[in-house]
Image (cartoon, grey):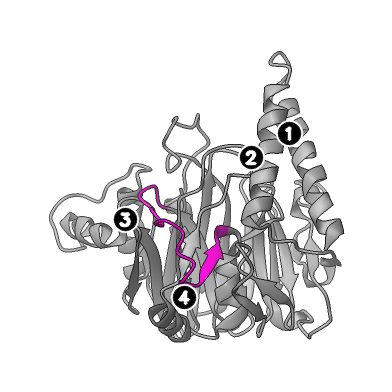
Amino acid sequence: MCTRVMWPEANGSVIVGRNMDFHQDLHTNLWKLPRGVDRNDRVEGKLKWTSKYGSVIAGVYDILSTDGVNEKGLAGHILWLAESEYGDPDPDRPQLAMSVWLQYFLDNFASVAEAVRWVEENNPQVIPMTDPTGGSKPAIHLAIDDATGDSAIFEYIDGKLDVYHSEDYWVMTNSPSYDQQLELVKKYEGLGGDQPLPGTCAAPDRFARATYYVHNQPEPKSRVQATAAMASIIRNAAQPYRIPEPGKPDASTTLWQVVIDLTNPRYIFESVTCPNVVWVDLKDLDFTEGSGDAKLDLVKGLTVENGLSGNVAHKFEKHKFHIVSIEQAKLIGEVAAKAKESLDSTKPIEDRIKTVQEKVDAKLAEFVDAT
């Protein structure tokens, strides 16, 4: 599930691309989140902060941040890592629910170096949450990158936080852990070995292809060329529509893709099912304290005919973004599981998914109304 590629040599710009791969629709919308918002860890509320920087994020089910960039050009990307083990909850460490892990970095840091320094000094712990669709607990790792071309990957293996920090870490996919990926890629031609470049959808193969192509790009002559080059790289690492393989979340379908200009913050989004490209320049949004959260409804608005396209900065509408707590995610998961049990198996799968989502949306609305 998912591929992230950074290109820090794009004619003076740092360009990042990512694919979101999953086995079912994630009901993704874009959000504008301003400065001055009070948040907490969404576990027990011990870690509290007020957002220093505004950000544009891609939200999953409108309850958590999964990808985004802040106004300083720091971006973050949540990807699947099946080997993730976060350890038993330790109340003596700063804790962050999965739902707010990425947002903490976008809210508080202007650079990768700042973020890594905080991580190394505080050894934070990510607390797993229930899948709001009623499935198994997510297993994720996090990549961050910034306008200087710096990069870091955070993984939890056997309960230990591993930090990979280097301007050389341009590519990230999924399993195995990052240190192993760095070794596996060396066997391919053009990357240190003599084996031909692989072509499957497996995470190590996507890692190899993305690494090869991003390191062999000619210098672009314009911002448009840089964006087009990155889009071609992540499309090469995309996964086709297919039947998901049980127990293999990394064998999924590419749902959407983004290209981000970190130097002159621009967020470009393309859905695979409704391929109208939309983008927003962060300078065109109001991130001032008190300006309020705002939502760009892609679920309803990103249609093939007469849908959203192009620059959509003026299309965001005020709406509260509610990041769920560990307990709320559990309750939503229970609602989804109960709804699935009561479904009529003779109805089309699309109708059954819609019914479950309506139940989940109703439960989420309760949490939003209570804030």
Q: Which of marks 2 and 1 is nearer the N terminus?
A: 2
Comparing marks 1 and 4, which lies closer to the viewer? 1
C-beta proximity under 8 Å, tags 1 and 4: no
Residue range of the region highlighted in magenta in the rendering: 81-98
Q: Name the residue under label 1.
A: 356
The residue under label 4 is which amino acid type?
Asp
Q: Is the magenta stretch mostly helix, strand or loop?
A: loop
| CA–CA distance in space, label 1 to label 4 | 36 Å
Q: How far apart are marks 3 and 4 (CA)?
A: 25 Å
**Dot 3, how many residues are within 10 Å of its Cα: few (below 14), some (14-19), or many (20+)?**
few
Q: Measuring from the top left, give residue 114's x and y in whole percent.
A: 47, 86
Q: Is mark 2 on a helix, strand or loop?
A: loop
Query: Do tag 2 and tag 3 residues touch (Cβ < 8 Å)?
Result: no
Density class for disc 2 (Cα within 10 Å; few <14, some 14-19, many ≥20) is many
Residue under numbered circle 4 = 145
Q: Point out the tag, 3 or 4, that comes first from the N-terminus.
A: 4
Q: Of the residues tagged 2 and 4, which is closer to the observer?
A: 2
